[in-house]
Image (spheres, rainbow, N blue to C red):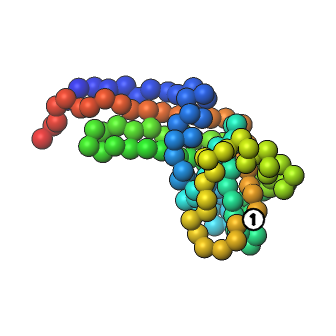
Amino acid sequence: MTQREIDSLNPEQCIELLTQQVVGRVIFVDEQGPGAVPVNYAVAGNEIILRVAEDSHLRALIGNPIGFESDYTNADQSEGWSVLVRGSGREIPMTEVPQILKTLGDRLSRPWAEGVHNTWLGIKADTLTGRRLSGAIHARLF
């Protein structure tokens, strides 16, 4: 089987890839231990933008260390990428929402879950890391 390298991605590549997806996972630690929750999102600058319900458990992450991961895989080609954001969560004041809407344009991700999602959360990226594996495998072991 042909050996392939896993490429490390720089922060600019990570942001570019994150803008290509709309679903990721919020990663956190709570009283039960590590957890991850799938969410839909958008990217404004180097901040992940989420809209949640006022009573969402994700509000508990405000001010706390938080991770966010999104990825893409193509199983047929044995390729894909993964980006990890590490930072802290914050509630976005409504005064900032118009500028975010302007920045996002048609890239605003609408919540999939039912209900009113009028609380805006941001995950400010302190660090961005990513990996990519690309190119088809030329030979299989079986």
Name the foreground residue: 7 vs 102: 102
Q: In this view, does 115 lie above or below 39?
A: below
Number of other residues with Cα within 10 Å of mark 1, as a class: few under 14, some 14 to 19, many 20 or more: few
Q: Say what secondary structure mark 1 lies in.
A: loop
Locate residue 119 relative to residue 27 in the image: left or right: right
Q: Disc count in the image?
A: 1
Quadrant location, the N terminus: top left
Q: Residue furthest left?
A: 142
Name the foreground residue: 23 vs 108: 108
Q: Where is residue 125 in the image (x, y as percent from the top left)?
A: 70, 39
The residue shown at (61%, 62%) is 111
Residue that label 1 marks: 118
The residue shown at (28%, 38%) is 77
Q: Is residue 59 above or below residue 136?
A: below
Q: Is residue 3 above or below residue 49?
A: above
Locate residue 34 relative to residue 49 in the image: left or right: left
The residue shown at (70%, 36%) is 45
Q: Position of residue 16 (x, y in %)?
A: 56, 33
Locate residue 91 relative to residue 108 in the image: left or right: right
The image quadrant of residue 139 is top left
The image quadrant of residue 13 is top right
The residue shown at (63%, 67%) is 32
Residue 128 makes an appearance in the image:
yes
Quadrant location, the C terminus: top left
Q: Position of residue 94 (x, y in %)?
A: 84, 56
Residue 34 makes an appearance in the image:
no
Q: Which residue lies furthest to the right in this view?
A: 95
Given the image, on which type of amino acid does mark 1 rest? Asn
